[in-house]
Amino acid sequence: MGSGVQDMFCKSKKKAVETGDTAPDFELLDQAGVAVRLSSFRGRVVVLYFYPKDDTYGCIAESSDFRDHYPEFVSANAEVIGISSDSTESHARFAKKYGLPFRLLSDKDNSVRRLYGVPATLGVLPGRVTYVVDADGNVSDIFNSQFNPKSHVAESLRALKVNVQEAD
């Protein structure tokens, strides 16, 4: 595929974070207005999912699937964190409406999205990418699927099982 066509589908201003990289640290506010820093979760696995927008069809499906499987993540000593450019107030409404038990972080200026190199779909839609960050702070798995939002949960759970087996 020519680079122009590829750029149209996956546009990013910097090199994207890759498997094996140290996950870039950041601090953002959650839906309660509390500052959350990624590095504060060292020693635990973090499933960090970037999604386009609160209360949209695919994002409801993805976030609800994370909610429904949240006990499995907790059992694996993993933290689930969602990130979009929506405000903390929007995240609070979204979390309450769908009973989301995990943090949603507000990346209003998309600085963390850019830091990770999350590509835009068709050059305009904020990308849907999930990063599994291991207990040492390294990216162990990445899933990118804008149009199959529920696959992110299944792939994250699969990655957690692999990480547990490798640790044994």
Image (cartoon, rainbow, N blue to C red):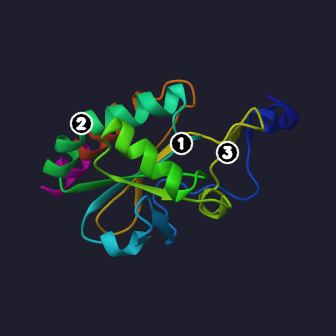
Taking the magenta stretch, the answer to whether it contains residue 134 is no
Tag 2: residue type?
His
Q: Which mark is residue 69?
A: 2
Tag 1: residue type?
Tyr
**Label 3 – label 2 distance at C-alpha:** 26 Å
Q: Which mark is residue 51?
A: 1
Q: Residue at x 48, y 53 (%)?
A: 19
Q: What residue did someone put label 3 on?
A: 119
Magenta stretch bounds: 162-168
Quarter holding residue 4: top right
Q: In the rendering, at what x and y percent does residue 133 appear?
A: 38, 58
Q: Is residue 134 visible?
A: yes
**Label 1 – label 3 distance at C-alpha:** 11 Å
Count of marks, rendered view: 3
Q: In the rendering, at what x and y percent does residue 1 appear?
A: 79, 28
Query: Mark 1 or mark 3, which is nearer to you?
Result: 1
Instruction: Using the image, determine if residue 88 lies above or below residue 119.
Output: below
Tag 3: residue type?
Pro
Sequence-first disc among 3 and 2: 2
| Front residue of this view, candidates 99 and 43 | 99
